[in-house]
Image (spheres, helix red, strand yellow):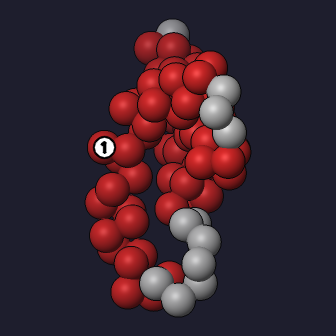
Amino acid sequence: MLAGFISELLEIYTIVVLANAILSWFVFGTQNSVVRQLYWWTGRLVDPVLNPIRNALGPMTRNLGIDISPFVLIILLQVLRGMLL
């Protein structure tokens, strides 16, 4: 029962990470305050976990011009979720 609950929390967090990644494509090109607020709130939840991944990947991905840390985090979350189930 506890594993199922944690698994669901990981799934919700995965959706938040994905939403943050998608919003990051639009937030700097819009004046829409709803988009900016959503990006800010999801960033508050996601950035503390993404920053260590960004620091670890920084030297390898510096010249790519794209931040792949959300994708790495989603893969890690899905592996962890699979281990729980």
- As drawn, 72 above or below 27: below
Residue at image point 53% right, 89% down: 63
Residue at image point 38% right, 63% down: 53
- Find residue 8 and report its horizontal and vertical position in percent: 58, 20
In this view, the residue in front, 77 or 44, is: 44
Residue at image point 33% right, 56% down: 51
* Residue that label 1 marks: 48
Left or right: where 40 falls relative to 23: left
- Find residue 1 and report its horizontal and vertical position in percent: 51, 10
- As drawn, 3 above or below 18: above
Quarter of the rendering containing residue 48:
top left
- Find residue 49 and report its horizontal and vertical position in percent: 35, 46
Left or right: where 44 falls relative to 33: left
For mark 1, give the secondary structure.
helix
In this view, the residue in front, 74 or 79, is: 74
* Amino acid type, label 1: Pro
Q: How many marks?
A: 1
In this view, the residue in front, 65 or 16, is: 65
